Image (cartoon, rainbow, N blue to C red):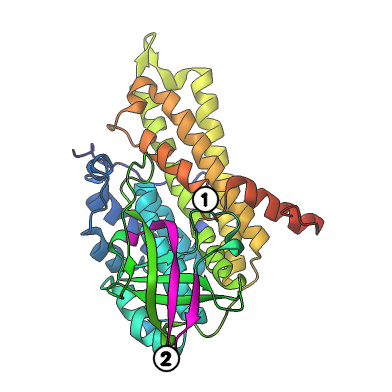
């Protein structure tokens, strides 16, 4: 089914646009228009069918959503981190699953190849990933190891000019149709390394995960390695240890901190419009105090999240953003968006549970976003460790 016309114009209560460059606003607006034209009319159908629309891949590449901060010499746009955040915001305003696809491609596949890969790996993979000719996924989480990735069981053993990879990864966005996977596994000394595994390698399968009530318009699967031979030139040479995948997650979590704002803005925008149109007791419900309280709190929390993300983007541009700061923004902004989705559903009344509005879809999606790439509680402990210097994880 097609949605009603997408009338979204943005939420900017504090004039934050004045702090953006013309280029940043132009790229954001291009992403916004693409979402309005190519995503909004079809997203409810894709969600109901639990299917990612492959035709979105070219559009995502065209608006620069794949590795926007990757240097132009490798096919990226060479843009700054705030622009990357703004693109993620607009994509998640359309759907969290759409943003997940672009976020994984950019921060979890292109980023490690760019930062940790050899020049040959960069030249081979990055241009095709930027253009959407190739889609990637990121294999870190395992069936028994989510918040504790260092306990992973996936491993590889030396076999001459290649290694033999065994193990399984779970909850992997893009896995069912990805051309490559950046996989994290332990060598024979229990040191974690990243390997680029290509579709078609022996013993490598990507079963689709079914039964999701969240992120239904994003394809999720497993990565299974059964004595899979991987050439040694596919091992990322420039960083190993748990810090390598966690560095990728910092980049992805930063994008999520912006993306969640998009979902929140969409819910708020819908609730505000509905409150002016829905008449009860002879006047629009937006004229009643309790509804105004909800709307005023929504726009306040969105504004606070926008300022948090903007400052974090400035720090990222300076190379000064810390893991603790990124965790704070991811945790705060996703929780904010989920709270707003729930309040917006109440303003819509019974209509809020239907797919005539985006509210329930955003709410279900955000239940995943608040858990993946560091749960709500884990991010709290990352900030806690940062401010106290004491480790509560062990």
**What predominant SS class does the magenta segment belong to?**
strand
Disc ID at residue 15? 1
Picture layout, residue 253 above or below residue 116: above
Magenta part of the chain: 155-175
Residue 319: quarter of image: bottom right
The image shows residue 213 at horizontal and vertical percentages of 37, 39
In depth, the one of 144 and 181 nearer the eye is: 144
The image shows residue 198 at horizontal and vertical percentages of 33, 75
Q: Is residue 333 left or right of residue 388?
A: left
In depth, the one of 94 and 169 nearer the eye is: 169
Q: Residue at x 20, y 59 (%)?
A: 55
> In terms of secondary structure, where does tag 1 sit?
loop
Q: Which residue is mark 2?
A: 161
Quarter of the C terminus within the rendering:
bottom right
The image shows residue 122 at horizontal and vertical percentages of 41, 84
Q: Earlier in the sequence, mark 2 or mark 1?
A: 1
Residue at the left extreme, as displayed: 1
Do callouts 2 and 1 mark residues in contact (Cβ within 8 Å)?
A: no
Q: Is residue 247 left or right of residue 179?
A: right
Picture layout, residue 95 above or below residue 268: below
Q: Residue at x 44, y 60 (%)?
A: 169
> In terms of secondary structure, where does tag 2 sit?
loop
Number of disc labels: 2
The image shows residue 373 at horizontal and vertical percentages of 52, 55
Picture layout, residue 334 above or below residue 275: below
Q: Residue at x 46, y 53 (%)?
A: 259
CA distance separating discs 2 and 1? 58 Å
Q: Does the magenta portion include 360?
A: no
Disc ID at residue 297? none
């Amino acid at each position: 089914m097609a949605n009603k016309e997408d009338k979204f114009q943005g939420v900017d209560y504090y004039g934050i646009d004045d702090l953006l460059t013309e280029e940043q606003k132009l790229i954001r607006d291009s992403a916004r228009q693409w979402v309005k034209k190519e995503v909004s009319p079809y997203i409810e159908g894709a969600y109901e069918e639990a299917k990612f629309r492959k035709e979105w891949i070219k559009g995502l590449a065209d608006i620069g959503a794949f590795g926007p901060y990757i240097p132009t010499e490798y096919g990226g746009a060479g843009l700054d981190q705030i622009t990357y955040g703004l693109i993620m915001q607009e994509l998640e305003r359309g759907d969290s699953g759409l943003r997940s696809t672009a976020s994984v491609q950019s921060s979890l596949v292109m980023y490690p190849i760019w930062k940790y890969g050899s020049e040959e790996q960069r030249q081979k993979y990055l241009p095709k990933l930027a253009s959407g000719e190739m889609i990637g996924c990121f294999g870190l989480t395992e069936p028994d190891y989510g918040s504790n990735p260092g306990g992973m069981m996936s491993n590889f053993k030396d076999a001459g000019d290649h290694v033999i990879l065994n193990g399984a990864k779970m909850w992997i966005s893009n896995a069912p149709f990805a051309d490559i996977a950046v996989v994290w596994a332990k060598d024979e000394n229990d040191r974690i390394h990243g390997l680029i595994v290509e579709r078609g390698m022996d013993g490598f399968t990507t079963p689709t995960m079914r039964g999701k009530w969240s992120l239904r318009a994003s394809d999720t699967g497993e990565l299974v390695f059964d004595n899979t031979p991987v050439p040694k030139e596919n091992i990322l040479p420039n960083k190993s240890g748990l810090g390598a995948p966690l560095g990728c997650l910092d980049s992805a979590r930063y994008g999520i901190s912006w993306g969640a704002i998009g979902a929140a803005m969409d819910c708020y925008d819908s609730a505000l419009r509905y409150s002016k149109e829905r008449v009860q007791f002879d006047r629009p419900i937006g004229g009643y105090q309790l509804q105004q309280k909800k709307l005023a709190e929504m726009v306040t929390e969105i504004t606070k999240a926008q300022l948090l993300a903007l400052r974090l983007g400035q720090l990222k541009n300076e190379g000064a953003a810390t893991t603790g700061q990124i965790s704070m923004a991811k945790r705060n902004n996703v929780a904010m968006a989920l709270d707003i989705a729930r309040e917006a559903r109440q303003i819509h009344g019974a209509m809020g549970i239907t797919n005539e509005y985006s509210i329930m879809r955003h709410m279900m999606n955000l239940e995943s976003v608040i858990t993946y790439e560091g749960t709500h509680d884990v991010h709290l402990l990352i900030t806690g460790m940062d401010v106290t210097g004491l480790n509560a994880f062990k």
